[in-house]
Image: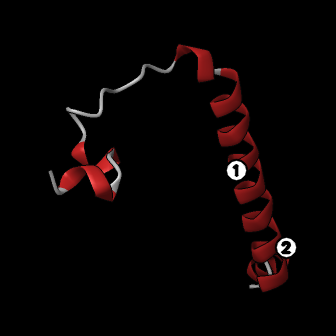
Amino acid sequence: MADKQIKEQETWMPSLKWLCKSFLVIMVVLVILFFSLNFLLKPYMRDIPMEITPWLQKADNTDK
């Protein structure tokens, strides 16, 4: 019985502060990774013609 109580005391539970901090770190790393890859791979992205994607055209051109 005493052995079980010792194991329960040694079990680590993350606090809300730790969860928020780890979530923030993960999100910051993901955002930095996204923008750095976007910047580095910009020359390799293809240009999509406006005729294929009408939602990329300006509002003035869609009325015609």
Numbered label tally: 2
Residue at 20% of width from left, 32% of height from top?
52
The residue mark sitting in front, 2 or 1, is 1
User: Label 2, on which residue?
Assistant: 10
Crowding at dot 2, Cα within 10 Å, few <14 / some 14-19 / many 20+, comes out as few
Residue at 73% of width from left, 34% of height from top?
36
Image quadrant of residue 26? bottom right
Residue 3 visible somewhere in the drawing = yes
Q: Secondary structure at mark 1?
A: helix
The Cα atoms of the two marked residues, 2 and 1, are separated by: 35 Å
Whether 5 is drawn above or below 44: the answer is below
Q: Nearer the viewer, residue 31 or 52?
A: 52
- The mark found on residue 31 in the picture is 1
Percent x, y for residue 4?
74, 79
Residue at 21% of width from left, 32% of height from top?
51
Which amino acid does the dot numbered 1 rest on? Answer: Val
